[in-house]
Image: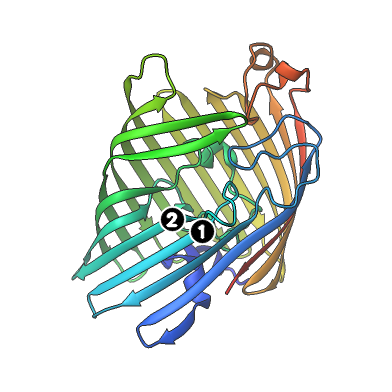
Amino acid sequence: MKTSTFILIPLIGISFASNAAIKVTDNFSIGGFGSTSMTKSDNSTPLFVHREIDDSTCYDCDTTFGLQADLTMTDDVNASLQIVKRPQDDWSDPEIEWAYLGYQYEDFSFRGGRQRVPLFLVSEYYYVGQAYTWARPPQEVYDSLMGFTFYDGLSVTWQSDISDETAVTASLYYAFEHEYKTELGNDKLTFDTDRIAGTSVGLSGFNYRVHLGYAHVKFTQLPAATPTAEILNVYTLGGEYSHEQWQFMAEVQSDRIQTNWYVSGAYNYDMFTPYLVYAESHHRRQSQSLTAGLRYDISYSISLNAEWQGIFMDSSSYDKFGTGAFISPPKLTGEDKDAQLYTLMLNFVF
C-alpha cells in the first residue's frame, strides 16, 4: 500500500467495492465486498451494538457481505443499488443500504432514494472493511447512533476544486419518515423518525481530508409507557492526514446525551500496517478503549487484520449499572467492568 492510498480511497466518493467491479456493459457494472472474523472476548457480557461479542469464540459476529450495481443511463443520470448482509442480519434477510437515482448538473449532484447518512469519515464505505485500516471502525463513535447508517430522502451536493490540489464538497439532505429497528440483547427497540435533516462539508487534498457533519433528528422511541417525540442534534468533526508511511485519523461526535471520540495512528511498511487507536465515550456511556492491531495486505483486494482491544469502564459507572461498550450492564451478572477482545478478520472486495 503506497502512501497516497491512505487518502485516495475516501476521495473516490463512492464505495471502495466499485474499484474492483465487474464491467458487464459499457454503462453497467457489479461489484462486491465482504468481511468475516474469528473473535472472542474474556467477558461474558456481549460487546458492541449489532455484534454482541462475548467469551464464546464467534465466527459470524462481524460477518458482512455486500453487492453493488451501478448503472450510467446518460452522461448526467446514474443509478446505484447496494444490498448488504450486515453483522446483525440473517443471510436470508439482507438490507438495502442504498438505492438511489442521481442527476449531475455542472458542479451539483442531486439524488433521490435510499442513501448513506454522511456524518462520519468512513460513512460512505462503513461496511467495506477493505477500505479502512482497522478490523472495525472505532465503536465509540460509530456505535453512537445505534448503528443506523442510511436514510430515505433527497440530497443535493456541490463539489468544486478550489485549487489544483484541494477540493471542497458541501451537501444538504432531508429524510422522510422511517422506522429503524434494532435489538439490544433481548430488547427490541424501534426509533420512529418523523424527519432527519442535515448537512456535511468536506475539504480534501492529496494527503488530507477534513469532514464536518450535522444532523437534526425528530424521533419517538418505542416501546415506551408514554411515547414522546424527541429532538436530537448531532454534530461530528473528523480529520485524516498522511505523511510518507504514516496515517493519522481522529473524530468526535457529540449530542445532548453523549460525547465520543477517538484518535488513530498507523504506519505502513510494504504489506504490513501496524496501528493504534485510543477512544473514549462520555455521558450516556462511560468507557475507554485501547486497540493495537496489524493489517496484512495479501493483495489490493484482500487483507487480514489481527487485533487486540482493551475496553475499560469507570468504577463509578460500573457501580451505577452503566453499560459502557457492553450491550447490558456487566454488574447485573456480576461480570468484570473491563474486557479484552481478540479479533482475526478477513476483508475482501471484488
The quarter of the displayed image where residue 235 is located? top left
Q: Is residue 169 above or below residue 9?
A: above
Q: Residues within 10 Å of mark 2 (few under 14, many from 20)?
A: many
Q: Residues within 10 Å of mark 1 (few under 14, many from 20)?
A: many
Task: Provide residue 74's location: percent of width, then percent of height.
Answer: 24, 80
Task: Provide residue 277's location: percent of width, then percent of height.
Answer: 65, 44
Q: Is residue 26 above or below residue 90?
A: below
Q: Which element is circle 1 on?
A: strand
Task: Provide residue 170's location: percent of width, then percent of height.
Answer: 27, 54
Q: Please tell me which of labels 2 and 1 falls first in the chain.
A: 1
Image-based side of 30 in relation to 91, left or right: left
Pointers 2 and 1 in contact (C-beta within 8 Å): yes
Task: Provide residue 3's location: percent of width, then percent of height.
Answer: 58, 68
Q: Which element is circle 2 on?
A: strand
Amino acid type at circle 1 is Val
Residue 84's mark? Answer: 1
Residue at left offset 61%, top offset 29%:
186
Query: Which residue is disc 2 drawn over?
Result: 97
Q: How many numbered tags mark residues here?
A: 2
Q: Determine the CA span between mark 2 and mark 1.
A: 6 Å
Residue at left offset 55%, top offset 60%:
128
Q: Quadrant of the N terminus?
A: bottom right
For this orientation, the residue located farthest to the bottom is 26
Nearest the viewer among 250 and 76 is 76
Residue 162 shows up from this direction: no
For this orientation, the residue located farthest to the left is 105
